[in-house]
Structure formats: C-alpha cells, structure tokens
Amino acid sequence: MKMRELEQATGVNRETIRVYFRYGLLPAPQRDKPNVADYDDSHVEGVRTIRRLQKEQGLTLPQIRAALAGGSADMPLRAGAFPHLAQLLAGRVPEADALVPLGALRARNPRVSTDATALARIGAIELQRYRGQPAVSRLDAELLGIWGAMRAAGFSEANGFGPQVLRFYVECANELARREVTEFLDIVTGRLGDAEAAQLALEALTRMLPFFGLLRTKAVLREMHSNTQPRPTRRRARTPPATSSPPRR
C-alpha cells in the first residue's frame, strides 16, 4: 500500500507517521524504486500500537522506542496504573476527537489549507480524513482559527512571520505537558481511581490555563522591558585637574 492508503487505514497523517519512522518505531518500507515506498499490514499495526501507547498509557515516543527495544526499565512505574484514565479524560473533552472539515474553516482563515500543512509539519496540529476530505479536530480547528486572526493582525510572511515561528510553542507545550502529566500521575497514583483522577485532570486543564496565561503575560512584559530599555552607561572617572605647586620663597 502507498502512504495515502496507510493514512486512511490508521487515521494518522503522513507527517506524524514520518516522525514515527525518524524515531525508529516502524520497520523500513519496501522500496522497489528509490522514490517509491510500499507499506504493509505490519506498518498499519505498528502505527495503531504507537497511538494506543500514547493515548492509553501516556507514553512519549522515546519511552515507546525504549519499550520496543526491550528497555522495560525505562518505562514509568505508573504506566498501567490508570488503564482507563486517558479514555475518560478524552471523553470529557469532546473537542479532542470531533472532526471539522478544513473547508469549513476558510471564513476564519482564508489560507487554512496552506497553514494546516505547515502546522502539521511542526507538530502543532494533526491532519486527518473525514469522508474522504482533509479534516482536523475541533481543538486543531481553533488553533487554525487563531493563527488566521494572527495573520489578519499583521503576523504574516511579509512581516517576517510564518507558521514555522510557532515551532517553539509546540516544543514548550510538549515539554510542559510531559512535566504536568508526570507530576500529576506521581501524586495521584495509589490515591485516586480512574474516574476521580480524570475529573481532577479536567479541572486542571480548564482552571490552570488562565493561571499559566497570566504567568506568561507577566514574563513577557518583564522580558520586553529588559530587552528594550537602554542599558545604563558607565561614566568614566574624571581626572582631577592638576594643581600647581605653590611658589617657593
């Protein structure tokens, strides 16, 4: 099968699948010609397994790579402690899975197709298929709408801004999420059940977002001030005028 068919069989877009290949999580495809790759059922099952480990166990790609290599010591002890937590939490955030066709977003972002491809390339969103058409989750649709508003405000390629400038947001969000989830699970493991933990996680998702936003606003204002104010210049010590010796008598 070709990449397009692999996308359809797994529901995962090609940019994400290529990331899996870069991490060495999938076997190399058969190549009868240099630029032609053929995939089989092992790739379909591999992609589904990776997605399942990510969603159900909350594992990162490096952890999955270690697990596939037999490095069980690198697996977190809490993995498996909440077998239904991910599903319960996702069920309480319906925007995560509900799909929106890209065409429905053009009113908010006239360049939605181009931006969707660019944002998927940096891992900000995930392109999917719905009834044969490109689509995104409602969360990703909101991200595309926000970027469309940013374009309208002047954050355009003409002014030196493109979707690639969002890469560091993706990296920061992934690192923050990793630390949040690790800290959260370390605390609740052995204390709460799946349903209680899911409700607590949902509260954190909704309540701590404005908290973090305020912290970010304070930090940006502080950094902007320190990076735009002129630095005080050191005054050179003035050499005292030479005094003439009193005349000798």
Image: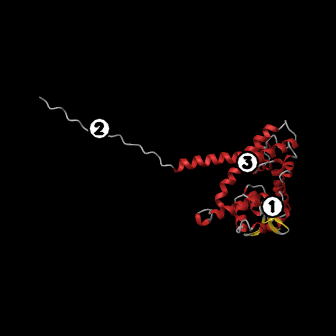
Please name the residue that numbered disc 1 is placed on.
12
- Residue kind at label 1, given as amino acid type: Val
Q: Quadrant of residue 3?
A: bottom right
Residue at 72% x, 50% y is 174
Q: How is the image coloured?
A: secondary structure
- Residue kind at label 3, given as amino acid type: Leu
Q: Is residue 125 visible?
A: no
Please name the residue that numbered disc 3 is placed on.
209
Report the label total.
3
Position of residue 143 relative to residue 31, above or below, is above
Earlier-in-chain disc, 2 versus 3? 3
Count residues near mark 1 (Cα–Cα under 10 Å), then give few for <14, some for 14-19, many for 20+: some
- How far apart, in angstroms, are the residues tagged by discs 1 and 3? 28 Å
Count residues near mark 3 (Cα–Cα under 10 Å), then give few for <14, some for 14-19, many for 20+: few
- Residue kind at label 2, given as amino acid type: Pro
Q: Position of residue 33 (x, y in %)?
A: 75, 71
> In this orientation, which residue lies closer to the viewer: 165 or 19?
165
Closer to the eye: label 1 or 3:
3
Which element is circle 3 on?
helix
- How far apart, in angstroms, are the residues tagged by discs 2 and 3? 60 Å
> In this orientation, which residue lies closer to the viewer: 173 or 76?
173
Q: Position of residue 152 (x, y in %)?
A: 65, 64
Q: Is residue 217 visible?
A: yes
Residue at 23% x, 35% y is 243
Q: Position of residue 68 (x, y in %)?
A: 80, 50
Q: Quadrant of the N terminus?
A: bottom right
Closer to the eye: label 2 or 1:
2
Earlier-in-chain disc, 2 versus 1? 1
Q: Determine contact: label 1, label 3, CB under 8 Å.
A: no
Please name the residue that numbered disc 2 is placed on.
240
